[in-house]
Structure formats: C-alpha cells, structure tokens
C-alpha cells in the first residue's frame, strides 16, 4: 500500500525531473473531473486545484459540484465524474456491488479532540424538551435519502440511546436546513461549519456530538470507478498524491496553525472561492474556520469504520447482505486503519 504526503510527493516529482523523466500522467496531461460538495471538508480538492498540485501531477482537473452524496456516486458510475469525495451511502455500496465503483481512500474522520459533527434540534423541539440525544425518541430526524450518511448517523445515535425515531427524506442539504429551521423536522446532524452558524441563528440548537457515538467515524471517503481503480493506476495514484498535498496544507494551516493567523487568512481566502460564495468574505470566514476538522493524511482509510457502515446498511436491508468489504474497497492505494 502507498501513502502520500506533501514532502514525499514533491521529492518523487523532483527526482523524476532530475532524471529527465516525466510520469505518464504528466506526459498525458490527463483531463479529470472531480466531484465535490461546497463544504469546508472538501477543501483538499480546492487546495490541490488552486495551488497547482493537480497540474504538477499531470492532471487537468475540473471540479463538478453536487448537493448530495447519491448523485455523486451515480456520476462516478456513469463516467461523468472520475474521482470524488463523499460519505458512504447505500447507493454507493449498491453501485460497488454492480462493479461500478471502488472506495480508494479516506477524506474526513471524527477524531478525539477535534470539533466534529453536531447533533441539532429545531427550536420548536428544543423548547418542547429535546435538549439532548436521549430525548430523540418519537422525534423526526432529517436525511437526504434513505441509506444516506444522515440515516446511518441518526440510527446509530438512536440505538445508543435506546430510542426509536422516524426519518424524513428531503433530498438536499438546503431542504433539510429549511425544514429544521421551520420545525418541520425535529433533529439532524451535520459538519460544524454548517451546524454552528445554524445554532447561532437561534432557530436551531446543538444538543450533542456525533463523536460521542461514533468516535472514529470515517465521515467521507475518496472513491472512483472500478475501471479507474483497476486500469488507471498511475492516474489514480497521481490524483491521490495531489489530493494528499491539499490535505497536508489544510491540516498544517487550519489545525496545527503552522503559518499562524496569516496562513489561516490565506487559506480562508482560498476556500471562500468555493464555500459560502454567496456571503462576503468576512461574513463567511467564521463559518469556514468553525468547520475545521482534520482530514486524513495521505488519504488513509479507517477500514474498521467502513466495515461498520457496510454492516449497518446490511442489517437495515438497504444493501445486499452478501456484499463483502473487498467489493466496496480497493485497499491497495493508501494506508488503512483497522481500529
């Protein structure tokens, strides 16, 4: 298995240049479409594009934006998108079972000590007593679709608390936010850069943390078509190398603050080109900073978490019970964590 970080990647590229050689991907200047959501957690792709890491790896990258995980998985399967970052979903697993896609790395995980995804309650539900996840019994939890990551998270929280609740599919994140603020649903869970501003509005309240229920949750994964994983290895390795440079820059700047406040300001400027673009930069900056969660260095994948997700989807009869982890994951590209 191969792990990439920025230093190693630059060393490899430098060695190739010194030898007068170019990688096949650089020689080809391969056109690649990368799927993303306009979330801070997708910043590695934005950084790799803006700072030329994709170009240095020989990839001519175009970003294509989506509003939910399921359409992105379909786009990978159809060939409209080459690589993407999104949560594991029932649809993604079913497409893997059909031989259409493979998970090849990790992007975002819950990590102890790092502020993560929040459990939210509408103001109406909060005023009626929903002040902690223990009171979720009989409540309505928002999700994009059945078999989405929201469905998984909500079910895991309810099971841990020993309560039952209903789920309402609303297709898009924007629709879920509207339903939560208006009290049409009682609860939801989402990344902090969305959760904290919602809570600040007074229409929504934070009542818990997903990390308390899923402490090592592999929130999002890097995935591609099965054909790319098996037949386009050099291009796929080039993508992961450049993506991992973006990850390293993001973590060093936003988590470790290696470049101080000036570095954070520069990173916020870059991310704001893609996230909260409808807001002035200064208004968007607090939300972008609030969304800081450590991304997986080298796109390392928590295989134990992915296994748990697969088993949950199977237990809910959302995917075929015969699907194996090897059907879903190609673990040959990055380091894996089985804990």
Image: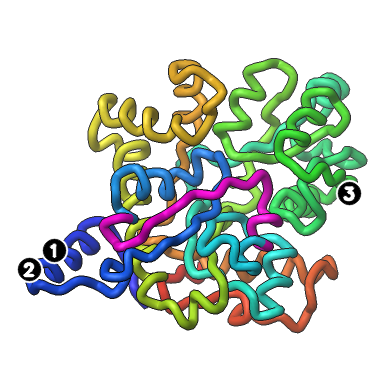
Magenta span covers which residues? 55-74
Direction right: furthest residue:
138
SS type, badge 2: helix
| Label 3 crowd bin: few (<14), some (14–19), many (20+), radius 10 Å | some
Residue pictured at 69% horizontal, 55% vertical:
71
Residue pictured at 43% horizontal, 77% vertical:
232
Q: Position of residue 291 (x, y in %)?
A: 50, 34
Image height check: is 312 above or below 272? below
In this rendering, does residue 172 appear at all?
A: yes
In this rendering, does residue 216 appear at all?
A: no
Q: Position of residue 90 (x, y in %)?
A: 74, 64
SS type, badge 1: helix
Reading the image, the residue beneath label 3 is: 164
Looking at this view, is 64 or 154 the one in front? 64
Looking at this view, is 284 or 65 the one in front? 65
Q: CA distance from mark 2 to mark 1?
A: 6 Å
Is residue 211 rendered to the left or right of residue 106?
right
Q: Earlier in the sequence, mark 3 or mark 1?
A: 1
Reading the image, the residue beneath label 2 is: 18
Question: Which of the labelled discs sits on residue 14, or is there none?
Answer: 1
Is residue 163 rendered to the left or right of residue 197?
right
Magenta highlight on residue 62: yes
Image height check: is 128 above or below 63? above
Between marks 2 and 3 in the image, the one whose residue lies nearer the viewer: 2
Looking at this view, is 4 or 232 the one in front? 232
Is residue 327 rendered to the left or right of residue 111?
right
Is there CB contact under 8 Å for labels 2 and 1?
Answer: yes
């Amino acid at each position: 298995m191969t792990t990439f970080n920025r230093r190693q990647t630059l060393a490899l590229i430098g060695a190739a240049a010194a030898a007068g050689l170019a990688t096949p991907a650089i020689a080809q200047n391969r056109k690649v479409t990368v799927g993303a959501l306009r979330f801070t957690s997708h910043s590695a792709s934005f950084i790799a594009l803006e700072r030329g890491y994709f170009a240095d790896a020989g990839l001519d990258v175009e970003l294509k934006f989506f509003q939910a995980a399921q359409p992105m998985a379909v786009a990978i399967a159809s060939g409209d998108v080459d690589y993407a970052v999104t949560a594991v979903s029932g649809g993604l697993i079913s497409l893997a079972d059909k031989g259409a896609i493979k998970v090849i790395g990790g992007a975002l995980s819950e990590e102890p000590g790092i502020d993560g995804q929040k459990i939210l309650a509408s103001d109406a539900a909060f005023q009626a007593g929903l002040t902690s996840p223990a009171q979720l019994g009989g409540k309505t939890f928002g999700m994009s679709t059945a078999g989405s990551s929201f469905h998984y998270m909500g079910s895991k929280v309810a099971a841990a608390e020993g309560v039952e609740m209903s789920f309402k599919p609303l297709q898009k994140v924007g629709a879920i936010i509207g339903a939560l603020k208006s009290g049409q649903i009682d609860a939801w869970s989402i990344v902090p850069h969305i959760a904290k501003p919602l809570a600040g509005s007074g229409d929504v309240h934070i009542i818990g943390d997903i990390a308390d229920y899923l402490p090592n949750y592999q929130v999002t994964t890097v995935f591609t078509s099965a054909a790319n994983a098996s037949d386009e290895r050099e291009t796929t390795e080039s993508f992961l190398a450049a993506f991992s440079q973006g990850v390293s820059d993001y973590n060093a700047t936003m988590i470790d603050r290696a470049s101080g406040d000036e570095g954070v300001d520069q990173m916020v400027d870059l991310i704001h080109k893609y996230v909260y673009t409808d807001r002035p930069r200064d208004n968007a900056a607090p939300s972008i900073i609030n969304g800081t969660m450590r991304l997986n260095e080298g796109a390392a994948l928590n295989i134990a978490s992915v296994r748990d997700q697969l088993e949950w989807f199977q237990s809910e009869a959302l995917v075929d019970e015969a699907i194996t982890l090897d059907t879903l994951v190609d673990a040959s590209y990055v380091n894996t964590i089985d804990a």
